Amino acid sequence: MATATTRTIEEIRQIVEEKARRAKAVAPIMASLSTEVKNRALLNMAEAIWERRDFILERNMEDVEAARHEGLSPALIDRLLLNEGRLESICKSLHEVAALPDPVGEIIEGWKRPNGLVLQKVRVPIGVIGVIYESRPNVTVDSAALCLKSGNCVVLRGGREALNSNIALASVIAQAASEAGVPADAIQLIDIPEREAAQIMMRLNGLIDLLIPRGGMGLIKYVVENATVPTIETGAGNCHVYVHEDADIDMAVNIIVNAKTQRPSVCNAAETLLVHKNIAERFLPVAAKALRDKGVELRGCERTRQLVPDAKPATEEDWATEFLDLILAVKVVDSLEEAIEHINKYGTKHSEAIVTKSLEAAKKFCEQVDAAAVYVNASTRWTDGYEFGLGAEIGISTQKLHARGPMGLRELTTYKWVVWGEGQVRK
């Protein structure tokens, strides 16, 4: 795992600003690239990753071994780990992005004014996207791919624990994209581990047009509170599954087990289970056994612990915690209204699910729960750009402007007004 050097703040600033300047300089070229060139670059990137997989996996193993030596949790190491299967998924995602429609140049709407002017609202790239993220190396490729296809340049700043992996991936994909006709400076990686690099990046107004943090709640909060560059709040996922009084018990058990255990270290994994009091006695013992069999530690309210005696007492902090681990908070509620109130109080506006046979209950849940994605009878684990048909995602926005939920190609664009005239002047 890379460690900080003795660089001065000014030296770090020069490195970061130079990379951002180089990206900014080629942004107009990126904005005008043809779809053919962009797609060819994406396919080249996939081919290069697979051809260089041994090199990439060797660099990744250096990071993984260092993380184990430093005592990182199994969940965090899982986020860091690459293997052939995960590289294959990354390559597949690149093909998916290449197959998606190019949003750049789309005429969103238009009309002709009585004075003869023809107005068009045209979709265009944002410019230079900065991405600050933690230990998942796949974010390096996903972010670069989506920015490239949407005509944006990208400045990437991954976590110190994944530095070797990110350097390997970024070097491979940048060269492959350049060979296809993409400007060589369009994909930039801040390849130094100093924490100050991210802090400097957050304040590069005029060089970076939009900043997207990806990672845990601590990182996201820090970036949102300290950045002067416009920022989209993403990712923190204190997600809930609510089991209504009329739920199918087998379905509810399958959903909560999947939502919690399929990959507990990610932001769309469930962290709290809410259960209606009228189904708790029948449901909770069955669900608890299924979750225990998967290694999940339960932390419950008093009513939960009466039905599941080996559950640990839940604290107020537990309701607000994104565990990112095999830990689940459990609460028995008196009503659908109490479940909605709990979610809106403690949730992070990411992904929330209800299990119910009642269309009325489902409708009320969907209308009143404030979240980017709301599920009826399905796992929260589906909140993902690839699974939503977006090819990949650069993040999951938990705010309301300008994007919400998984951010794909269209969410990485803005628009400009193009006005066609025949000599009109205003009197």
Image: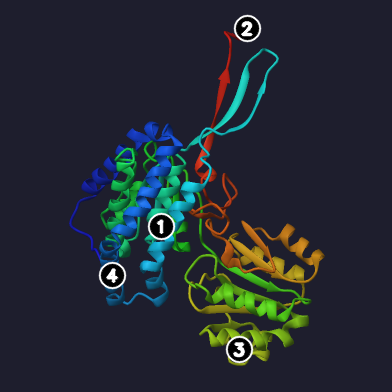
> In terms of sequence position, does the residue under pointer 3 or pointer 2 come before the other?
3
What whole-number distance in Å separates the C-alpha atoms at marks 4 and 3?
Answer: 35 Å
> In terms of sequence position, does the residue under pointer 4 or pointer 1 come before the other?
4
Q: Nearer the viewer, mark 4 or mark 1?
A: 1
According to the picture, the residue beneath numbered tag 2 turns out to be 427
Is the residue marked by circle 3 packed among few (<14), some (14-19), or many (20+) residues within 10 Å? some
According to the picture, the residue beneath numbered tag 4 turns out to be 61
Residue 58 locus on image (x, y percent): 26, 67
Q: What number is the disc on residue 384? A: none
Give the residue drawn at x 32%, y 63%: 162
Give the residue drawn at x 76%, y 76%: 334
According to the picture, the residue beneath numbered tag 3 turns out to be 289
Q: Secondary structure at mark 1?
A: helix
Three-letter residue code for mark 2: Lys
Residue 120 in the figure: left or right of residue 188: right
Is the residue marked by circle 2 packed among few (<14), some (14-19), or many (20+) residues within 10 Å? few
Q: Are marks 1 and 3 in contact (CB under 8 Å)?
A: no
Confirm whether residue 229 shows in the render: no
According to the picture, the residue beneath numbered tag 1 turns out to be 91
